[in-house]
């Protein structure tokens, strides 16, 4: 078994392989993107395709943070919770963008991303969970999300390996999934094919400011002048090191996950399955990803016995076959979480654009984030569906002047 701590290495889900050669930091670019995770590379790819000179700068390797630690679910319905009414239109808009995003990404990279459209099942075990699931279903219907109520027998007809104690559930037909490692490999290739420069293992140490405007970045490899800087550094966006005068409410929310190897003896799943404790996502290579804990531990990457036990026990409650599956890998990662669990998009300072705080929805929201940021940079316009997600909302919520 291989162990990945903070998404560094794991056999099945390791990061993209380096292409021949290595990009060097240019002196100038139209746009400098800080962070080569899913969001940073998606934004960079979109801008490079539009003809801009784009440099994406990463202190480690592309995808080393939450992007390769994620499960890759596109779960607008399954993730929907009370209080998420404002976020739901953004999620649905991005879900609709995923098909053309996938088509373009696969065509321009030459890779497939294991896009799976079987849908997602959200299941309940026992009477109390059924009542809570009914409440969730009412909320989904009220907010226009596709979800079908299923009886226990109907669910087990779709997934025979589930326990008889699975007594009801929801089928979310539009909640699909991708393989994060494949997406990141494809983004890396597509971005560079579009003319973008990917600068890895290079830390951004400061922002350059001129005349009250952000005009570039300072790095360990030198300075880069840029017309616009995009901050897309995931859970690190809120650490205050680059913009100490800007209160950016983003923090790390740790998640531990594991990969199990499905076999004919253990049985398998065809759909993503959610319970109240875990989610389980089958991938095209025969692995089953089980995730994820939710822990307020700062940047502590360590795996814990309690966290891994909770994942196994949560999976076993619904799918007894996990007892026969080999543990292929375990890892932790840091979700970039804002104070209201929604992304922060838009201009924060002249010349500085934010694409941060995506919480558990990074993969779902990548296409709409790329469209919103590129629309702002290319045309100076705010995408209407992204308008509620600027930084100023936090000042309004606290009663401070916007």
Image: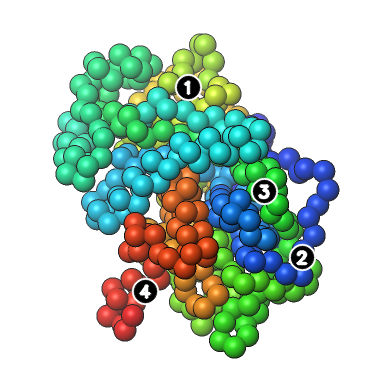
The residues bearing labels 1 and 3 have C-alpha atoms spaced at a distance of 46 Å
N-term mark: 4 or 3? 3
Disc on res. 323: 1
| Quadrant that contains the N terminus | top right
| Quadrant that contains the C terminus | bottom left
Above or below, comparing residue 191 to residue 74 in the picture: below
Residue 387 vs residue 297, the one in the foreground: 387
Element on which disc 3 rests: loop
Location of residue 67 in the rendering, given as x and y in whole percent from the top left corner: 56, 47
- Mark 3 sits on what residue? 194
- Mark 2 sits on what residue? 26
Location of residue 337 in the rendering, given as x and y in whole percent from the top left corner: 44, 59
N-term mark: 2 or 1? 2
Residue at 31%, 84% in the rendered image = 401
Q: Which residue is the extreme one toward the right? A: 21
- Mark 4 sits on what residue? 392
The residues bearing labels 4 and 2 have C-alpha atoms spaced at a distance of 33 Å
Residue at 56%, 65% in the rendered image = 230
Q: Are marks 2 and 1 in contact (CB under 8 Å)?
A: no
Mark whose residue sits in front, 4 or 3: 3
Q: Are marks 4 and 3 in contact (CB under 8 Å)?
A: no
């Amino acid at each position: 078994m291989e162990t990945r701590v903070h998404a560094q290495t794991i056999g099945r889900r390791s990061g993209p392989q380096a292409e021949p050669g290595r990009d060097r930091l240019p002196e100038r670019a139209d746009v400098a993107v800080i962070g080569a995770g899913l969001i940073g590379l998606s934004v960079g790819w979109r801008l490079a395709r539009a003809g801009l000179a784009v440099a994406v700068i990463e202190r480690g390797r592309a995808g080393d943070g939450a992007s390769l630690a994620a499960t890759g679910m596109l779960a607008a319905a399954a993730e929907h919770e009370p209080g998420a009414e404002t976020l739901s239109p953004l999620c649905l808009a991005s879900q609709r963008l995923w098909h053309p995003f996938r088509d373009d990404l696969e065509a321009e990279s030459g890779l497939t991303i294991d896009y799976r459209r079987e849908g997602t099942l959200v299941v309940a075990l026992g009477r109390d969970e059924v009542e809570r699931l009914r409440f969730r279903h009412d909320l989904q219907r009220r907010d226009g999300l596709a979800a079908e109520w299923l009886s226990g027998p109907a669910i087990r007809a779709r997934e025979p390996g589930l326990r008889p104690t699975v007594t009801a559930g929801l089928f979310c037909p539009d909640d699909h999934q991708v393989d994060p490692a494949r997406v990141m490999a494809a983004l890396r290739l597509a971005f560079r094919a579009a003319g973008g420069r990917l600068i890895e293992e290079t830390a951004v140490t400061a922002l350059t400011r001129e005349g009250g405007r952000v005009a570039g970045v300072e790095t360990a490899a030198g300075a880069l002048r840029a017309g616009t800087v995009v901050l897309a550094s995931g859970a690190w966006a809120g650490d205050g090191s680059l913009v100490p005068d800007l209160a950016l409410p983003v923090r790390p929310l740790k998640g531990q996950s594991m990969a199990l190897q499905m076999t004919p003896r253990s049985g398998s799943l065809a759909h993503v399955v959610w319970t109240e404790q875990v989610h389980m996502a089958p991938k095209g290579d025969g692995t089953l990803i089980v995730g994820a804990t939710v822990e307020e531990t700062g940047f502590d990457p360590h795996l814990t016995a309690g966290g891994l036990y909770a994942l196994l026990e949560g999976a076993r409650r619904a799918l007894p076959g996990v007892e026969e599956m080999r543990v292929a890998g375990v890892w932790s990662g840091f979700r970039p979480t804002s104070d209201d669990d929604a992304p922060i998009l838009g201009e924060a300072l002249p010349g500085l654009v934010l694409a941060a705080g995506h919480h558990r929805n990074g993969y779902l929201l990548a296409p709409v984030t790329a469209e919103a940021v590129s629309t702002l940079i290319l045309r100076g316009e705010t995408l209407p569906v992204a308008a509620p997600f600027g930084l100023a909302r936090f000042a309004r919520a606290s009663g401070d002047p916007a």
